[in-house]
Image (tube, rainbow, N blue to C red):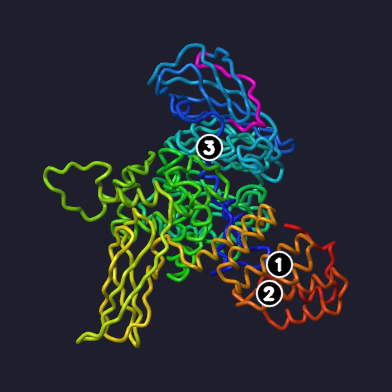
Amino acid sequence: MSGVQRAAARGASPPCGGLAVWLTLAMLVVAPYALAQTGAQTGSQAARFEVTQYAIAAQLYPSTHMLKAKARIEFVPKADVTSLFFDLHSALRVEKVADAAGQSLRFKQEGLTLAVDLLNPAPQGKPSSITVDYGGPLASADGSPVEGLKLAYVGPEGSYLLYPGRWFPVNAYGVNRFAAAVRVTVPSDEIVIASGKASAPEREAGTVTYTFRYDQRSFPGTVLAGKYAVEPAAAAGADITLYLKEGHQNLAQKYGETAGKILAFFSDKFGPLPASHLAMVEIDDQTVGGYSAPGLVALASRGFSNPVNYRLLAHEISHQWWRCLVSPATPDDAYLDEGLATYSAALYVEEAAGSNAFEDAMHDVVIRSLTHEDAAPVSQASHLHEFTPEYESVVFNKGAMVFHMLRWVIGDDAFFKALRTMVQQYAGKAISSEEFQKLAEDSSSPQEKSSNQRETSSNRPLTYFFAQWVTSTGIPQFKRTWAVYRTAKGYQVVGKITQDLDIFRMPVEVRVTTEGRKPVNSRVDMVGTTADFTVNTVTKPRTVVVDPASRILKYDEQTKIAVEMARGDQLTQEQAYLEAIKQYQQALEINKNYSLAHYRIGETFFKLHNYNAAAEEMRAALAGDLNPKWVEVWAHLTLGKIFDVTGQRDRALNEYQRALQTNDNTQGALDEANQHVQKPYSEASRQIS
């Protein structure tokens, strides 16, 4: 689903579209896959039984937003149980629950929790079943498992019943893999798309029924329905069908071709999928930006664009491997889903656009990682609430950095071998962080052990890495000192790297730039707070840079500024404007001439109608470093608006002309300036975002 961010320094976004807009899009794109458990299904209750299969018959009534359904739930107790607990969308009301013999069972709904009392204890290991009849209106976000976000909706413009919406009784969300047979009846002019093998539609007067069967254990509980144009994609080596709404059919070819390339790339890197067919379905903008189920990728209308948003598309398609094929064993292992999907998308960015684009993508990931890195270790994802900046920072982005750093530690060959092995050995299963660590170790070069040394979790080769980056918090900030000596063959640089994390252990790259020659790189194994290095060069050394390729999650001055800006943008998105101003001011304490920080503060004051303070900050932005360059045109444009609002038309026109003289049309700035030259800006045209 999505998470909202953009690096505030490099690649900083234009006005009113700062980090906040990207975070909104990003969270709407990725967050649903990482929902943590809610309701009563926690701890031992969720672990006491496992659902093996659902048989769901549902009818959608789009004109009245109603869902009517019956779900037969087959389960196997892990211990003797007398009660069952499920999550169910709280707008849906249960009418009846019956056991396998058809006898009615007592049940209780409270919030998202459905509790069912069995007539007799269900013995450990013996398959059993219950049937639940339920229904209700799905017209808004009311009752959603995530407050304010529609994850299940039925309506005339199209219906989407996403697995995260708990539109059927769900056990151990995101952990309990299951098979499913789904039968859905809709008005006769609609099409239904879901995971699994489809039977021929059954038509009756005014309705049509679609049936899907998914026999593997995964997360096939997503159903999409609506009036679609069906567009088979001409993608080499891939079976892709697009289901698009009116106005987007012209994008079918480009999205189909790109999806085919992404599938081929991931298949080469991770191994092939069991099934080659992929359905790409357009859903409404009022929900998440994207979601993936087995054999199915749903994108909100805003996700279809020209050029193709291949980073978003790659993220969603990667979930065919990370979650649909191999899933986290527990909510605390969620980085093996969302973190790996985020990193997979960056890998495709490198494939599609080159190393510079990959570095930019990873720079974004670094900034997002650091906005709330201290909220919890990666291994304690269940302690965070899904769809929050904290969850997105720790699970999606620091999780992605875990994989990026692991690749640096063990090398490309071992890293991709570990991912391919994970697909081979855990296809259709769940994997824990400890199990993934073992795969990474086995894929790395073997290390010598004495004949009487028994491997334990504490002495395994990569325990230090996972202890530092997965189960702990804390980020290094490197400092370096060095001296240069003449030698018979040139020069020798002798130096020391320091940082404050006591348990730190990582290979660190040191780059020495020299006069007239290529830089000289050296890999230094750093254990603890200090490490010495020696680098020989032919020509005179100029600078020494620690971790020049940003292979390690770390702080430096520019990163700190970007993180403070990112936090400010998050607060702006939440309309916590005064707190946002304080956050932007933290960036100015590091660099008082940072134009973007002044601009964001001025933009926020403008939203608060504090026009004098807004004007002062816009002037400070223009007097600063003009980083990024678009600040100049938008500062003049905003000053023009301020003067228009305060009845100073001549001064407003002067600022609009200065904006036009920049010849910078970032996000339509020149178009807006021309508009206000013709007609003064007024409060009536203003929207507070």
Taking the spot 46% from the left edge, 30% from the top edge, the residue there is 43
Residue 375 at x, y percent in the picture: 51, 48
* Residue 529 higher or lower than 418, as above or below: below
Q: Is residue 265 left or right of residue 613?
A: left
Q: In the rendered structure, are the residues bearing label 1 and label 2 in contact, judged by CB atoms less than 8 Å apart?
A: yes
**Nearer-the-camera pick, 139 or 495:** 495
Label 3, secondary structure: give it: loop
Query: Residue at horizontal 75%, vertical 64%?
Result: 606
The quadrant of the rendering that contains the C terminus is bottom right
Q: Quick check: 312 left or right of 470?
A: right
Q: Position of residue 109 (x, y in %)?
A: 62, 24
Quadrant of residue 154 within the rendered picture: top right
Q: CA distance from mark 1 to mark 2?
A: 9 Å
- Residue corresponding to mark 2: 620
Q: Which region is colored magenta?
A: 88-101
Residue on which disc 1 sits? 602
* 119 w.r.t. 136: above or below: above
- Please rate how many residues cluster around mark 2, counting C-alpha atoms within 10 Å: few if below 14, some from 14 to 19, many from 20: many
Question: Label 3 belongs to which residue?
Answer: 221
Q: Nearer the viewer, mark 3 or mark 2?
A: 2
* Secondary-structure class at tag 1: helix
